[in-house]
Image: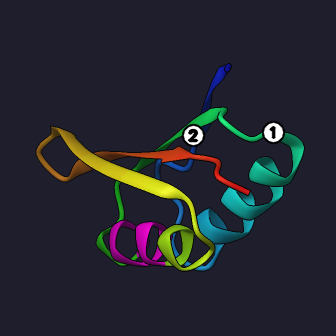
Amino acid sequence: MAEYELDCLGEACPVPIVKTEKKLKELEIGDVLIVQIDHSCAMKNVPEWARKEGHDVEIEEVDDGEWEVIIEKRK
């Protein structure tokens, strides 16, 4: 299992979802992707999309208005 970070700070939808989807395709099952987000729309849409795709998702607020979406690839 490996851990990767994806910087989507300053980017609005749909860019974070597109980048997240592209990066997850490169990862192995069990790998973890930490997506850094500071846009409320992306904060809602990225975890929703990842869960719908069947991945495990956790969200941590690391600063005021800045989050890390932690996605464990499941398939």
Q: What stretch is highlighted in magenta?
A: 42-48
Quarter of the image with the N terminus is: top right
Q: Is residue 45 left or right of residue 60?
A: right
Kind of residue at badge 1: Leu
Report crowding for label 1: few under 14, some 14 to 19, many 20 or more residues within 10 A (C-alpha).
some
Q: Name the residue under label 2.
A: 7
Q: In this view, does 9 lie above or below 17?
A: above
Q: Position of residue 38 (x, y in %)?
A: 34, 54
Residue matched to label 1: 27
Viewer-side residue, 15 vs 60 = 60
Q: Is residue 31 left or right of residue 40?
A: right
Q: Earlier in the sequence, mark 1 or mark 2?
A: 2
**In the image, farthest residue toward the top:** 2
Question: Disc 1 to disc 2, how far (Cα)?
Answer: 16 Å
What's the residue type where badge 2 is placed? Asp
Find out whether residue 46 is within the magenta segment. Answer: yes
